[in-house]
Amino acid sequence: MKYFKYLFIGILFGIIMTKSEAISWYRIQEMFRFQSFHMYGIIASALGIGVVLTQFIKRIQLKSLNGEVIEFNPKEMSIPRYLLGGIVFGLGWALSGACPGPMFTLVGNGYSVILVAIGSAILGTFVYGLVRDRLPH
Amino acid sequence: MIEFVSQAWPWYVSGPLIAMIMFLLLWAGGNFGVSSNLRTLCAIGGAGRKSKFFDFKWKDQIWNLVFVIGAIIGGFIATHSLSSGVPLQISQNTISDLSDLNIGFQGGLVPEEFFTWSSLASIRGFLVLIVGGFLVGFGARWAGGCTSGHAISGLSNLQLPSLIAVIGFFIGGLIMTFLFFPIIFN
């Protein structure tokens, strides 16, 4: 089954998110208050390794399991889109204490009410789709 | 081994493992971007009839939905089989700052007062879950990605748009924490 590998990677991701405590509302507050290195360490070390892996993939033109060379689609340059969209996202990240990955992981951790936040995030995405032509990009 | 795994994992273990997740997804033929699933779910729900933004071949994105189903299962496994039961080791300063905002800390991952169904009836619970969730969904799509897509995938590929987005994430997070929290929670 071609989706099985994604299920497996997802399970690993859920375990890592939980054990790293990156799904914790308190950890996100601690980060935005600059009171612990924990979240910064996670992001910085993920990035350090991530840059090396990405360069490695590009240099050797690594092929995915489908047999196609892995390609990266560069995002179109803009300032308002990323800055303003990013600020709105950041407001929500600090308030809900969870970005999308942790939201899903929290469901498995037994906090079923986070499904309401996921539903609300889907609604937010939908409303963006309705008004996006009127927003700066 | 199980004892070791059951502790909270330090940042220098967690961060590289997250990079490994990004690599595995690329290798499998996908990419690491969780918020795209929110758009896919809109498309499955028929939002393509309301906006062209949701009119795309969502079946190509099923792999990503399977990935987040995995994340839910992973969260379940971690909390039921790999948990030490040790309270969260959070900074005393954070506990004290939050206590000034009448937000308690009982050692759990999240404040129980916001993350129960009954909390939805309170103004604070409504704001945290419903308004917070809405802003995350709206902002992620406007910015073209969330923490996984921009802060990990995009920055790993040294993309300037992702750096701008991540700066935006922090501006928004700091405004919420230092300007809005005192208003909302006092």
Image (cartoon, coloured by chain):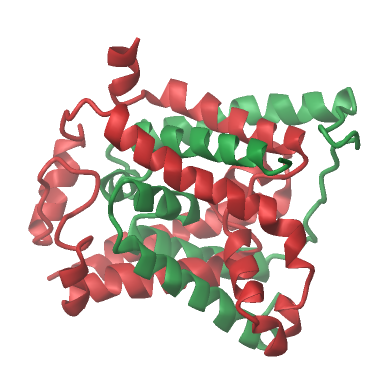
Residue drawn at point x = 37 percent, y = 64 percent: A115
Q: Position of residue B111 (x, y in %)?
A: 18, 54
Q: Could you tell me if residue B184 is visible in this image? A: no
Q: Is residue B49 above or below residue A22?
A: below
Q: Nearer the viewer, residue B182 or B131?
A: B131
Q: Position of residue A84 (x, y in %)?
A: 57, 70
Asked whether B13 or A94 is in front, the reply is B13
> In the image, what residue occupies the spot 87% across and 25% down?
A59
Residue A8 in the image: above or below residue B50: above
In the rendered view, does B145 fall on the left or right side of B77? right
Give the left or right position of residue A73, taking residue A128 as reference. right
Camera sees residue A7: yes
Count of marks overlaid on the render: 0
Colour in which chain B is shown? red
Q: Is residue B171 left or right of residue A97?
A: right
Q: Quadrant of the N terminus of chain B?
A: top left
Residue at 50% over, 78% down: A123
- Chain letter of the green region: A
Q: Residue at x 63, y 87 (%)?
A: A130
For the C terminus of chain B, the quadrant is bottom left
Q: Position of residue B148 (x, y in %)?
A: 57, 47
Q: Residue furthest top?
A: B1
